[in-house]
Amino acid sequence: MRLQILLNEGFAVTLKVFLQRTSLVFGIAVALEACSMGPQITRIQDVSESANTPYQKILVITLLSSFDSRRYLEDEVVLQLSKLGTDAVASTSMMNTKTPVTRQTFMAMVEKLDADAVLVTQLASLRSGGTVKDMRPEATVNFRPTGYYNVFSVELTEYMEPQSMEFEHSLVLVTELYSALSREIVWAIESKSKIVQDFDQKRGYSIIQDEAQAIAAYLSRDGLLAE
């Protein structure tokens, strides 16, 4: 029954557009693994009147070009939703890198789980730029006495590191919640993050955690979760 509902043309067309956009997301994995100041959230669609809230079982889908990036974000969202008492399943836990990322694949998951909602996160935009940074010089000074009273030999050695590259990313993600019963998008938010990362900076995953926490918090705040 759920599978037949999700065959609705509106859901199919929207998901098809999502999948087409993923081919443009060549830099998303790097951006998601950098450091940021946390996302700024904007609610772009209030809870629809047709929303049969609260939702008890949610299939979590992230549409990005990198399977690892999808898995990291989905797992974090599932973790945050679980902390709030909501049953959620990551789509990447039911597939591997060879599984086709298609509408049919996700609808089969919905049918298997008997999910009553689908949470889809996609990339809306990603702008990246790089600037060359001059590194600060480091110097050592050596004083040596000479054969003359109160006269010293001074040796200054200055070390200059090679120039470094700093990247800045402006990342916008859109998260939309579908109701399987109403066959409509019932809620949506947009999150914007600014990320600065040195070329040789170690990768971190704080932005993924921040995104997941924000998504779960807004779903809960708007009364969409069966907690």
Image (tube, helix red, strand yellow):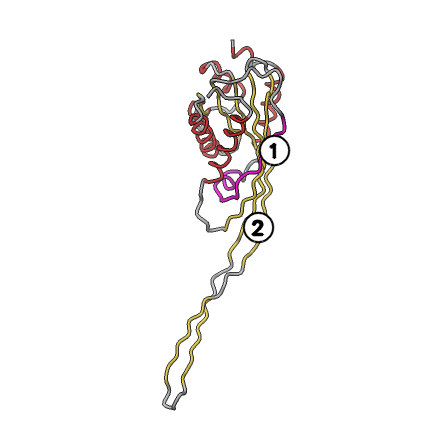
- State the residue in front, 162 or 119: 119
The answer to whether residue 202 is above or below residue 32 is below
- Residue at 37 percent across and 87 percent down: it is 146
Residue 219 at x, y percent in the picture: 53, 26
Helix, strand or loop at disc 2?
strand
In the picture, the disc for residue 193 is none
Place of residue 184 in the rendered image (x, y in percent of width and height, measured from the top left): 60, 18
Where disc 1 sits, the SS reads: strand
Q: Residues within 10 Å of mark 1 (few under 14, many from 20)?
A: few
In the rendered image of this protein, does residue 84 appear above or below residue 56? below
Of residues 85 and 17, the one drawn nearer to the viewer in this rendering: 85
Residue 42 inside the magenta-drawn segment: yes
The quarter holding residue 143 reads bottom left
Which mark is on residue 42? 1
Disc 2 marks a residue whose amino acid type is Gly
Q: Which residue is mark 2?
A: 130
Q: Position of residue 28 (x, y in %)?
A: 53, 38
Which label's residue is closer to the chain start, 1 or 2? 1
Give the label, 1 or 2, closer to the camera: 1
Q: Residue furthest bottom?
A: 148
Residue 97 lies in the magenta-colored region: no
Residue that protrudes farthest toward the top in the picture: 1
Three-letter code, disc 1 = Thr
Region rendered in magenta: 28-45
CA distance for labels 1 and 2: 27 Å
Q: Are marks 1 and 2 in contact (CB under 8 Å)?
A: no
101 or 198: nearer the viewer = 198
In this rendering, is residue 190 above or below 35?
A: above
The image quarter containing residue 188 is top right
User: Is the residue marked by circle 2 packed among few (<14), some (14-19), or many (20+) residues within 10 Å?
Assistant: some
Q: Residue at x 57, y 25 (%)?
A: 176
Q: Percent x, y for residue 144? A: 37, 81
